[in-house]
Image (cartoon, coloured by chain):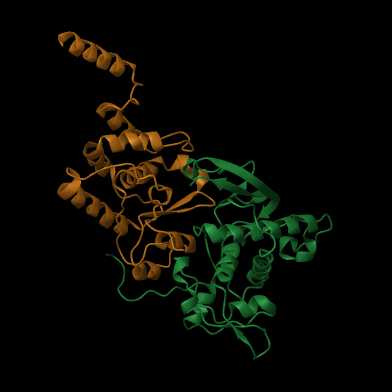
Chain colours: A orange, B green
């Protein structure tokens, strides 16, 4: 009997040792370092998903750090060719993209009607209101150019306050995950009109 | 909010006309007929539905038949215009000083390529609505001409279709600092076909120049 148990135990140990190693999880320190680096890349045309997956693994800790990165930016428009000149702004945009990715949602603010009265650049207005219902997106991406349009500062401020309030209330217990929906996390629309 | 209160008015081009400005003279031909009476383009293209589009006259000068508008066709026309209004064919060696703004100056092969690219764009619009839609100010002769080309290309899209699975297009200026390949967010991509070079006169985020290409892709996302 004892011999049988020992053999079973040995077999279990061997089986465990022979399992393929689980994908290396990023440490908390690595996660924090990646948060700081967001948007400061020399070239952002690489697959950012491993970074976002690292944030998802660290859920609440990552979300807290990401929310801390949020602040208003004065830039209105970042054409693809001007990205390296606007990395401070892109840091905020990538913090938001990361939050979208790990939570699966976004916040909007302001109203479409009042935005239209500002008579912004037509392309900026279009993408900030694209699929946004009655409110304003924090940012929008013109897909065929991969250029970025950012909301007016007061809209940004209102959205940032919503993120802070959400994190303070629900951030610790939220169920974080990988929400790999490009339209949401990269382009900033939570839905696309058909 | 720092915004003034009250309802917003979308005051661009035709939209503004529909909201109170003196009407622009209607352009001749099908292009004008399709524009007349349409609602303003909205930032959320999907909000334009068959239910809120008025009927369009089948015959520009005739009273008679009313046919229901095809919402897809309207989106396609507006997409072609919104995405490519600043893009023109290459010029012939004999081009006069009106340059790209005179169709007789266009290299015929390049013009045909641009028409095909625009027709493919209309095909992509059917599967990917994340596009810039826009309408012209018909009091502007250049915008009126480009709108006419957009309407023609949307019509041609009934026959000139991109290969199945083509779901993105990318507009780039070769040799410039801007985007040359799809962003990584598209996932795995396969280049289907590249059209060009064309002339980009600006106004749409792609750097100006004469090496403008329109690339079509099949992409994961």
Instruction: Please state the horizontal and vertical placement of residue A8, each as a whole percent of the image.
Output: 23, 15
The residue at the point 63 percent across, 82 percent down is B26
Quick check: B187 above or below A34? below
Instruction: Please state the horizontal and vertical placement of residue A88, each as a whole percent of the image.
Output: 37, 41
Quick check: A67 above or below B38? above
Left of A48 or right of it: where is B215? right
Quadrant of the drawing holding the N terminus of chain B: bottom left
The residue at the point 54 percent across, 52 percent down is A144
Query: Can residue B135 be seen here?
Result: no
Nearer the observer, B127 or B146:
B127
Spot the residue most to the top: A3
Quick check: B36 above or below A128? below
Image quadrant in which you'd find residue A173:
top left
Nearer the observer, A14 or B80:
A14
Image quadrant in which you'd find residue A54:
top left
Instruction: Please state the horizontal and vertical placement of residue B212, each as a whole percent of the image.
Output: 65, 49
Image quadrant in which you'd find residue A86:
top left
Instruction: Please state the horizontal and vertical placement of residue A27, each as a whole percent of the image.
Output: 27, 26
Spot the residue most to the front: A1
Nearer the observer, A36 or B57:
B57
Spot the residue most to the right: B94
Left of A125 or right of it: where is A68? left
Quick check: B15 above or below A148? below
Spot the residue most to the bottom: B63
The residue at the point 58 percent across, 65 percent down is B76
Query: Can residue A139 be seen here?
Result: yes
| Total residue callouts | 0
């Amino acid at each position: 009997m004892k011999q049988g148990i020992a053999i079973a135990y040995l077999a279990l140990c061997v089986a465990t040792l022979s399992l393929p190693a689980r994908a290396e999880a990023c440490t908390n320190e690595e996660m924090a370092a990646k948060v700081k680096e967001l948007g400061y890349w020399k070239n952002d045309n690489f697959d950012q998903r491993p970074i976002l997956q690292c944030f998802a693994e660290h859920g609440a800790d990552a979300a807290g750090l990401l929310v801390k990165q949020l602040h208003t930016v004065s830039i209105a428009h970042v054409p693809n060719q001007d990205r390296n000149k606007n990395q401070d702004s892109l840091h905020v945009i990538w913090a938001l993209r990361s939050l979208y990715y790990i939570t699966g949602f976004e916040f909007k603010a302001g109203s479409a009607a009042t935005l239209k009265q500002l008579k912004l650049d037509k392309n900026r207005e279009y993408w900030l209101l694209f699929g946004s219902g009655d409110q304003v997106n924090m940012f929008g991406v013109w897909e065929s150019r991969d250029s970025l349009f950012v909301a007016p500062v007061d809209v940004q401020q209102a959205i940032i306050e919503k993120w802070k309030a959400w994190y303070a209330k629900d951030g610790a217990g939220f169920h974080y995950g990988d929400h790999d929906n490009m339209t949401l996390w990269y382009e900033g629309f939570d839905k696309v009109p058909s | 909010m720092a915004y003034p209160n009250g309802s917003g008015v979308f005051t661009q081009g035709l939209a503004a006309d529909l909201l109170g400005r003196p009407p622009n003279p209607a352009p001749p031909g099908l292009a004008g007929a399709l524009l007349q009476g349409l609602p303003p383009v909205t930032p959320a293209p999907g909000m334009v539905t068959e239910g809120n589009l008025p009927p369009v006259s089948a015959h520009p000068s005739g009273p008679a038949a009313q046919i229901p508008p095809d919402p897809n066709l309207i989106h396609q026309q507006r997409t072609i215009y919104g995405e490519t209004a600043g893009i023109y064919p290459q010029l012939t060696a004999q081009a006069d000083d009106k340059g790209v703004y005179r169709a007789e100056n266009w290299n015929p092969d390049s013009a045909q390529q641009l028409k095909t690219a625009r027709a493919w764009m209309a095909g992509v619009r059917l599967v990917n609505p994340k596009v810039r839609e826009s309408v012209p100010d018909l009091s502007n002769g250049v915008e009126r001409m480009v709108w006419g080309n957009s309407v023609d290309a949307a019509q041609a899209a009934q026959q000139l279709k991109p290969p199945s699975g083509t779901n993105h297009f990318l507009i780039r200026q070769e040799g410039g600092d801007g985007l040359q390949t799809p962003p990584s967010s598209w996932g795995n991509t396969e280049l289907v076909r590249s059209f060009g070079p064309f002339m980009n006169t600006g106004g749409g985020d792609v750097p100006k120049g004469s090496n403008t290409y329109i690339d079509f892709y099949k992409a994961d996302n």
